[in-house]
Amino acid sequence: MSNAQTYTEAEVNERVREALEEVRAKVQELFPRAKDGNEQQVDGVEVIQKINQILSQLVEEEVTDEECEKCSQLMVVKHGRYGRFLACSGYPECKTSKAISTGVTCPQCKEGYLTEKRSKRGYIFFGCHHYPDCKFATWNRPLPEPCPSCGSTYLIQKYLKIVCPDKECSYKRISEERKN
């Protein structure tokens, strides 16, 4: 069952209007008109940076229970150009960030954990966070549950099937998503 709230189209439109009104008010606050009525000369890059800063403040951050290694503040989930990642809530004083773990220990180096990554072409794959020291990668989503047949430390999701990554093991089942 999903925890996402549902909104009517009218509620969504109203929230978007409110957010845009907040952005417009902030832009006017940051770039007021000159006293003689002429607009100030402002660098376009500066305006875009300020608008991005305002928009990022409007987006709600998902706070996690994980603490930053450097400053002990809580980590938050951020959305970047290559997907989601954890960042320190003390930004800009603390610039610590790291990938979100799938909960599976790397089967190759046994030290790292597997994270979701994006290829140059935008395809999702899963690799060890110790890259380039460890080059383990897979296209299939790893699941943090042991194989009931052979005892492998994790299972992988291939389309709507969940299978064991050990080629000699024949364990497979249908994903819970498909059953619903």
Image (spheres, helix red, strand yellow):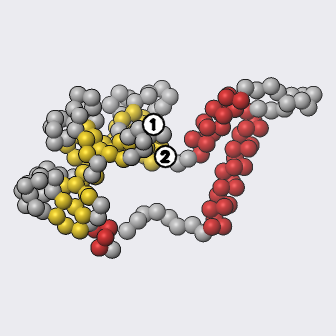
Percent from the top left, x then y, of residue 159? 30, 61
Question: Against 51, is 10 above or below?
Answer: below
**Which class describes the residues within 10 Å of circle 1: few (<14), some (14-19), or many (20+)?**
many
Q: Amino acid at mark 2?
A: Glu
- In the image, 40: left or right of 113? right
Q: Observer-nearest residue: 165 or 38?
A: 165
Rendered residue at 32%/31% (across/down): 69
Q: Does the rendering let one see residue 127? A: yes
Residue extending farthest bottom: 180
Q: Are marks 2 and 1 in contact (CB under 8 Å)?
A: yes
- In the image, 118: left or right of 92? left
Percent from the top left, x then y, of residue 36? 93, 28
Q: Amino acid at mark 1?
A: Ser
Which label was assigned to residue 61? Answer: 2
**Which class describes the residues within 10 Å of circle 2: few (<14), some (14-19), or many (20+)?**
some
Percent from the top left, x then y, of residue 80? 47, 40
CA gap, disc 2 and disc 1: 9 Å
Rendered residue at 69%/54% (across/down): 18
Q: Which residue is mark 1?
A: 89
